[in-house]
Image (spheres, rainbow, N blue to C red):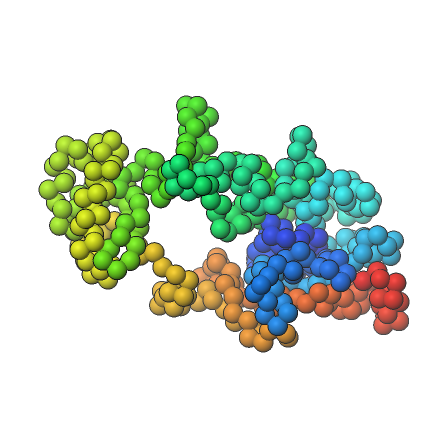
Amino acid sequence: MQPLSGIRILDLSRMVAGSYCSMILGDLGAEVIKIEQPKVGDDTRQWGPPYINGESSYFLCINRNKQSLTLDFRKEKAKEIFLGLIRQSDVVIENFRAGFMEKYGMGYQELKKIKSDLIYCSITGYGRSGPYRDRPATDTAIQAMGGLLGLVGEAGGTPYRVPLPIVDMASGLYAHGAILAGLIRRGQDKQSHFIEVSLMDNMLSLLLNLGSDYLLTGQVEERHGNVHLTIVPSNVFETKDRHVFLTASNDTRFKKLCQTIGLGYLVDDPRFSTTGARLENRLELEKLLQERLKEKTVGEWMELMYEQGEGVPFAPIRSLDEVFQDPHVISRDIVQEIQHPLTGTLRMIGPTVLYDHIRGRVHKPPPRLGEHNREILKKFLGYDEGQIGQLEKEGVI
């Protein structure tokens, strides 16, 4: 039994945040029915290249452990099917603009009359209130509006986006946690609950200490490249053959670092002997460290650091092929394989959390568009082949 076995989720989301959320819930054992627009499907089905035998790699990475049902909500029969499924489900996830579901008579207030203990999760770009509630949003647009994009890049240079959809992913994680909390609460009060998740709100939460610094001091941070604003050293350096990241977050670690790389005299230098002094003399210290680190290869430094530099984070900056060939990554069994009807053997990054010392498995490949129409309509609503064929002719599914 997986933690969420017996929980059924209707996932109307598209793109990343909602799909990421429902994937995690599916990894935990929930039955996820992904509802998509006929002939079009989730937006990420068209996000490529790369395509693997016609399937978008982007879609494949966030839609495992789900079934796909296509419904055209402009058709009354599609609404009837959806409401029939609501009666047998626990959670609804959607990421339409505020008011879309209400327009079709399928908003929270309508649905909880049908399913009195429904958990309803709405994910929007800017929230369901405020001047920007109707604005379209993407991850990068929210990075820009929320200040993150303005913090990434070299000092005085061009702003850079975080190359992963970090706000979408964080929003999916926030939504997943809130849904679990809603299910726990429902177990206590037997009531329905409404969850609102805003990408913009979540972006602000990701500002963490930099957001706090501004609120407490009024100080607006600028771009600083890879430099940490309060820890020195903490930066990217060059060795004889490649770049590494190293950091020494306190006096003890700084001492260990200096002793390990043969610069022990720096520990007693008043310019560098304390955290505050190192921060004030960052450039001088980094120059000395850089000159020394260039004298050996990363392999030579790694050997020294692991033998003598215990507690000092020192990591080579690696490419993805190196990451996935790493013996530690391989030993953790996080990369899993499953058979897909179009792509064949599909390798993917599997569930990251272990329960009772067991890693979750990828038990369903990402679904083809509408792959489970017949199965779902027969199993839950009792439709026969004739009825399903008629729905196809009418464009309902």
Residue 174 appears at what percent x and percent y? 56, 45
Residue shown at 44% from the left, 67% from the top: 333
The image quadrant where one finds the N terminus is bottom right
From the top left corner, tell me how far across and down residue 47 is, in percent: 61, 59
Residue 285 showing in the rendered view: yes
> Residue drawn 13% across and 50% down?
262
Along the horizontal axis of the image, is 303 left or right of 323? Answer: left
Q: Residue at x 65, y 60 (%)?
A: 46
Is 284 above or below relative to 351? Answer: above
Determine the image quadrant of residue 181.
Answer: top right
Q: Residue 285, position in %: x, y?
A: 21, 40
Count of labels in the image: 0
Give how far across and how far down residue 365 sits, in percent: 61, 68
- Quadrant housing the C terminus: bottom right
- Residue extending furthest toward the top: 217
| Residue 203 as seen in the image, left or right of residue 267 | right
188 is higher (above) or lower (below) than 331: above
Figure quadrant of residue 29? bottom right
Can residue 305 be seen at all in this image of the molecule?
A: no
Relative vertical location of residue 183 with respect to residue 304 in this rendering, above or below: above
Give the residue drawn at x 58%, y 76%: 344
